[in-house]
Image (spheres, rainbow, N blue to C red):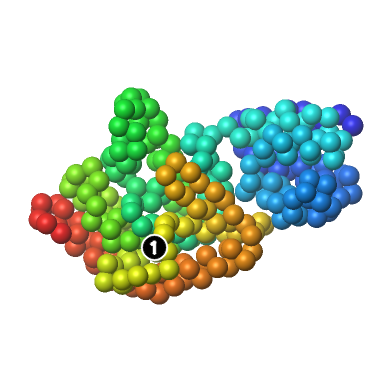
Amino acid sequence: MAGPKDLDPSSSPRALLGAELRHAREKAGLSQEDLGARLFVSGSFIGQLEAATRRMLPEYARLLDEALDTGDFFQRNCGAANKSRYPEHFAEAAEAEAIATAIRQYAPMLIPGLVQTPAYARAVNRAYDPTATEETIEEWVDGRMKRTRLLNDPTKPLLWTVLDEAALRRETGGRAVMAEALRHIAGLVRRSRVIMQVLPFSAGAHTSMQGALKLMDFDDAPTLVYFEGVRIGRLEDDPATVAELRLTFELLAASALSPEKSLALIEALAQDYTHEEHP
C-alpha cells in the first residue's frame, strides 16, 4: 500500500503524524495493543504517539511502516515532526507540555520556565553556557518565552507549582531581575492563572529532596512524569511510577505554605529585592 502524501511541516506535524498513525492502524484492523505487541511496546505507548504526547523516533517509524504496510511514510515524516527549538533532552517534554490539560511541578532550585521573565531566563541560560554567543542566548530566551504563551489562555492548562524557598532566595541575574521575576509570579497568582505554593526551609526534610519533578495530564493519553537533571531529561508513563510521583507531589503541597501565605512571602521578597534589602 502506498503511503499518504508527506505532512505539511507548517501545520502541527506531530499531531498530523499521530492522526495518520491512528488512521493507518484502524485501516489495518488493529487495536493499539495489537500494534504495540508488534513493536514490543505497550498499547498506551501507541496511544501516546497517536495523541502526539510522544515523539516518533526513527526506529519506531521503520517498524510502523513494516507493521502497517505504509511504505516509508512514517520514516519520511518523523524527521519533520520531531524538529524542535528546544534542547534534545527537553524537546519531548516541552512538546507534551504544550498539549497538557494539567501540569503539576516541584521546582527546587530555580523559577520554572513557564513563569520566567525574559531577564531571568537570560540569566539562567547565560549561567548554563557562559561561552555562548549573545545570538544563541537570545534564541534560547525566545524559545522559553514562547513556552510561556501557554498561560495566555485564561484557564488551560492548570498549572500548580510547589516552589522551593531556595529558588526565591537564589539571586539569579541580580536583585532587579529577581524583583521583576517575583512580581511576575505574584501577578499570575493574583489573576488566578496559576496555583503557587512555597515550600519553606522550615519544612525541613521532604519527599523530593533529590530533585525536580513534573506531572502532565492529557485529555486522551496517560499521565507523563518528567525527570530532569543537568543536561538530561526523561519521560516516564509507567502507572506505578506515575502514582508514586503523584503522591510525592501531594505530600510536597501538604508541606508547603498555603497559596495565600506563599503569595505574601513572594511579594515581601519582591519588595526586599526592589529596595536592595537583604531578604
Q: x%, y% of residue 64?
A: 79, 39
Residue depicted at 67% across the width and 40% down the height: 56
Q: Is residue 53 left or right of residue 45?
A: left
Q: Callout 1, which amino acid?
A: Met
Residue depicted at 34% across the width and 27% down the height: 132
Q: x%, y% of residue 57?
A: 67, 38
Residue depicted at 76% across the width and 42% down the height: 21
Question: Label 1: how many residues lie within 10 Å, few (<14), some (14-19) or many (20+)?
Answer: few
Image height of 61 relative to 269, above or below: above
Quadrant of the image containing the C terminus: bottom left
Q: x%, y% of residue 182?
A: 26, 54
Given residues 248 and 187, the one toward you in this image is: 248
Q: Which residue is mark 1?
A: 209
What number of labels is visible?
1
Q: Is residue 123 left or right of residue 230?
A: left
Quadrant of the image containing the N terminus: top right
Given residues 189 and 242, the one toward you in this image is: 242
Image height of 203 relative to 188, above or below: below
Q: x%, y% of residue 250?
A: 46, 71
Image height of 229 relative to 259, above or below: above
Given residues 115 and 134, the one toward you in this image is: 134
Residue depicted at 44% across the width and 72% down the height: 251
Q: Is residue 75 left or right of residue 12?
A: right
Residue placed farthest to the bottom in the image?
A: 254
Tell me the element at label 1.
loop
- Regarding residue 270, the answer to whether it shows in the image is yes
- Regarding residue 11, the answer to whether it shows in the image is no
Given residues 124 and 142, the one toward you in this image is: 124
